[in-house]
Structures are given as structure tokens and as C-alpha cells.
Image: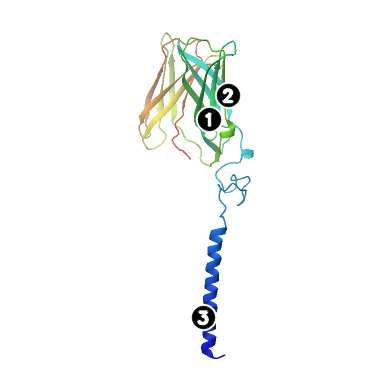
Amino acid sequence: MDWSTRRRSIVYAVIGSVIGVLLIIVGISIFYDTPTCMDKKQNQDETGIDCGGPCARACVADVKDAQVRFARAVSPAPTRTDVIAYVENPNANAYARGVRATVELYDVQRALLATRTVTFNLPAGAVLPIFVQGMLTSDIPVAQTFFTIDESSTQWTRTTIKPLFPSVKDVQWRTGDQPRVTATVVNPVAEILTNTQLIATVFDANNEAIAASRTLVGSLPSQGTAPIVFTWNVPFIREPARVEIIPITEVRVP
């Protein structure tokens, strides 16, 4: 074999190798599915299907269900019933968005008076008040209140970021025919906060919720404060022992 023939053979071999490598790359791109956190398979060191490991979504086995501390019907007017519930997220390193729950009111005969589906977010490790306004628009007494979370639709996301909320100080209240609660909300960050929601819950000496209300602070100055006021048009059914005001608008969201 002379030199020109050998050179052609070498060139053909190189070209063939390049074509072969290209065909392999194209074949892999066509027929090989790169593992993802949405491929409905347990791979890439996931601890469950599309959860745990490198995935943000937490596996069901690794989190605890949200807990309803209490749910109470409260009446700010003779023909209106609201509901206040406290929901606890026991997971310090997981949060849930778009949690669904069903609220039900029953009379003394166990007849259903009203039902409503609510949606809310659960920050990591937080206790969140859920205020449902105008559940019932009649003067029928409510005997039982149920707040049931739909765990099957709750998806937990892992996080190392702790939730941050405005704080509240100087809580005071006044009873009488038109009770009133006042306080000051404090912005912990160096930026203006808008549309900050806060919920006030009034408790009696037996730690039972007897009233609740919600307010919205349109603009909270950078590292500043703003006064907040909650009012009712009817007297409290019992003497208040304490008032909790909890901001439900997060300053820092994962």
C-alpha cells in the first residue's frame, strides 16, 4: 500500500469516527431521558418518586401533616357568623402553598348550616390564623365548627429559609358596646411593605376564642411602624383575657 492510499484510509477512518460519535450523541439525545424531578420516576438519588434528594418537593414520609389547633365560630353581628381557626405547620424545614381546607358549620340538630372551601399558604414552622368572613348570614346559633385540611392535595416543599413576618407591639383593648383593639405593627426590613394583612383573635380566661377580625396595612415604611385598629359593632360575649395579633403576610418568601 503506497502512502497516498494509506493517507486516504486514515482520512476515511477519522471521518468515520467523527460520524460515529455524532450518531451516538444524536441517539442519546433522542432515546435517553435525562432524569428530572417531574419524570414520575424514582431516580437521581431521590428518596421517593420526584421527591427528596435533589428535588425541592418533600416526600410524604419525611413531613408531618398540618395540625388544626382549633376552629371557632364567632359572631361580630346578630346576623353574621365568621370562623377563626389556627393551623400549625410542624415542619421547620418545609412549607406548603395552596393548601385546601373545608369549613363546615352545624346547628344543635347536626344539620349543616354552611360549608366553604378555603385556600391558604403554610410557612415553615409557623402557626397561621385562618379567618373566614361571612360564613353564615342568619341568626341561627352554631353548635359545631369543623375545619378539615385536604392532606391529599397538600404538597410540601423543602426549604432552609426561615419565614419572616412583621412584628406587633403595644397591644391594647377596650370593651363595651363597640369593642376596640389597637396595636403597632413593625417592619423588620429596610424596604417598604405593601398590603400587609393581620388577624386579631380575642381569647377569654379559658383560652377560648370569642372574637376575631382582620385588617390590612396598605403601606408599612422601611424599618418603620404603623398603627393598626380592629373594631366590632357588638360587645364581646365574655370578658377578654388576651388578644393575639398575627401578621399573615410574609416579608421573606422562599
- Label 1 CA crowd tier, 10 Å (few <14, some 14–19, many 20+): some
Is label 3 in contact with label 1 (beta carbons under 8 Å)?
no
Give me the residue at 55% from left, 63% from top: 27
Distance CA(mark 3)–CA(mark 2): 77 Å
Residue type highlighted by circle 2:
Arg
What is the number of the mark on residue 69? 2
Instruction: Give above or below for 109 relative to 1.
Output: above
The answer to which of marks 3 and 1 sits earlier in the sequence is: 3
Q: Nearer the viewer, residue 32 or 249?
A: 32
Q: CA distance from mark 3 to mark 1?
A: 67 Å
Which label sits in the foreground, 3 or 2? 3
* Residue type at numbered disc 3: Val
Q: Mark 1 to mark 2: distance in Å? A: 16 Å
Q: Decide if residue 128 is on the left or right side of residue 63.
A: left
Instruction: Give the x, y percent position of residue 36.
Output: 55, 50
> Which of the labelled discs sits on residue 100, or is there none?
1
Query: Mark 2, residues whose alpha carbon is within 10 Å: few (<14), some, or many (≥20)?
Result: few
- Give the percent coordinates (x, y) of residue 45: 62, 51
Residue 183, image x and y in percent?
A: 41, 22
